[in-house]
Image (cartoon, rainbow, N blue to C red):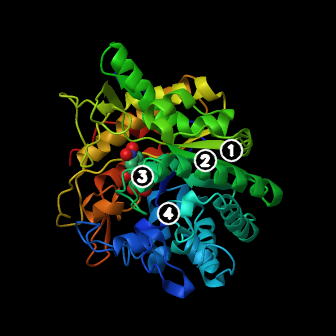
Amino acid sequence: MTKTIEFPRNFLWGCATSAYQIEGSPLADGAGPSIWQRFMHTPGLVPSGDTGDVACDHYRRYVSDVALMRELGMQAYRFSVSWSRILPNGKGAVNQAGLDFYDRLVDELLKSGIEPLVTLFHWDLPAALDDLGGWLNPDIASWFADYGDTLFRRLDDRVKKWVTLNEPWVVSDGGYLHGALAPGHKNLFEAPIASRNLMRAHGAAVQAYRATGKHQMGLVVNLEPKYPASDSAADQAATARADAYMNRQYLDPAMLGTCPDEELTEVFGEAWQPWSAEALKLTRQPLDFLGINYYTRSVTRFDERSWPQRAAPVRQKQATYTETSWEVFAQGLLDTLVWVKKRYGDIPLYITENGAAFFDPPVAEGGRVRDPLRVDYLRKHLTAVHTAIQQGIDVRGYMVWSLLDNLEWSLGFSKRFGIVHVDFESQKRTPKDSARFYSRVIATHGAAVSEPPDER
Ligand code: PNW
């Protein structure tokens, strides 16, 4: 007999997206360009040639997208605001039409009984600020706080949960170290500076929020547990470096006011400068919750050629891998939640992203998309969340990534993370089996997680 799964009645069930990945119309109504607009339009950078010019056309279809969420039973929707819609130059003059869009979206959600969870920054930095150095310019902390303040004044009467940054590690690693993401820099010296300024900006925005906001503010990080491939000293040390680089580099400054200098010096060498006491004071601001994005784990070994960490993941022979080459490993989510509680203490946690890209079959006659691998992925990870709650970890909600198939950044539209299929020609939305499954999970307070799969 399988045990029955039951989540707390007040557990918050929802889904997540981000602005550049779904909105389209990036320059509409007075918006300024973002670095993603610029990056995707630079010839040669994105192999598929895909752009966010239309994406899911959500900017124009948000009313029907909210209706779809309501039909699926969503209780919460995590979305991000495009900074350059609000401030076309990143600072200075406010574009009212940009604010109006998010104002209407929030009202539409509330009218449908869906709680908005708003992320200030999900990677689409105003291009005008990149021209001033972007995340390398220390002044960005105050630019970001001012941008936040503009949003808080307009929306805090209706938005009760806010997030400063989405995944600072990905911004620094992808945008400044390896260059696969905007702004596309490959520079060992820049990455640590970008990380520090991201976290300083986080702190400054939380301070601004405490001055004007009345509700809850959090930070979203992607966490990937690192397990040593062997008990050799070299593999153990490589694992510690990888963990410090990806996980502790951001949560330690936010939660403890410290930085794992020893390991990060091993990673970056002379490019690593310890953060000043002043910076660490700014980064450590009391938070109302932490958002955790979890996708996979890494079994880590020493690898001399893997720059700059000298640590590399080991492929697992028996495992299932997703279309983004991520191992399906739900135990890692439980391990991550246990680790967060142990290292950082009790703080309300939300899973702010979890999901998988798999090849889906075409939409069948009658409008069905069978995606058993995604259903299986969700089932396993929801079971892990449930186990964590039973172990006394304060997980308050879960947001699946993603509501819609969307623009997977430099990988374009080919990697489909949606529980709802999107036909990018017609913009037709078709809920996949995973969306049906997730709806039943929500409606049954989790019981459907342990129900047998729908074999029809
Ligand atoms: C997240 N990693 O990105 C982002 O928040 C989403 O915008 C994105 O679509 C989603 O995950 C799926 O990729 C990540 O390498 C990118 O560990 C890379 C990593 C983690 C998260």
106 or 52: nearer the viewer? 52
80 or 372: nearer the viewer? 80
Q: Are marks 1 and 2 in contact (CB under 8 Å)?
A: no
**From where the camera sits, is residue 77 visible?**
yes
Image location of residue 382, percent across then percent down: 43, 37
- The quadrant where residue 133 appears: bottom right
Q: Secondary structure at mark 4?
A: helix
How far apart are labels 3 and 4 at the CA level? 45 Å
Specify which label sits upstream in the sequence, 4 or 1. Answer: 4
Q: Is residue 411 above or below residue 233?
A: below
Does ligand 1 reach within 8 Å of label 1's beta carbon? no
For discs 3 and 1, the disc positioned in front in the rendered view = 3
345 or 432: nearer the viewer? 345
Label drawn at residue 187: 3
Residue found farthest to the right = 211
Mark 2: give few (<14), some (14-19) or many (20+) Cα within 10 Å. Answer: many
Mark 3: give few (<14), some (14-19) or many (20+) Cα within 10 Å. Answer: some
Q: Which residue is mark 4?
A: 70
Mark 4: give few (<14), some (14-19) or many (20+) Cα within 10 Å. Answer: some
- The residue type indicated by label 3 comes to Asn
How far apart are labels 1 and 2 at the CA level? 11 Å
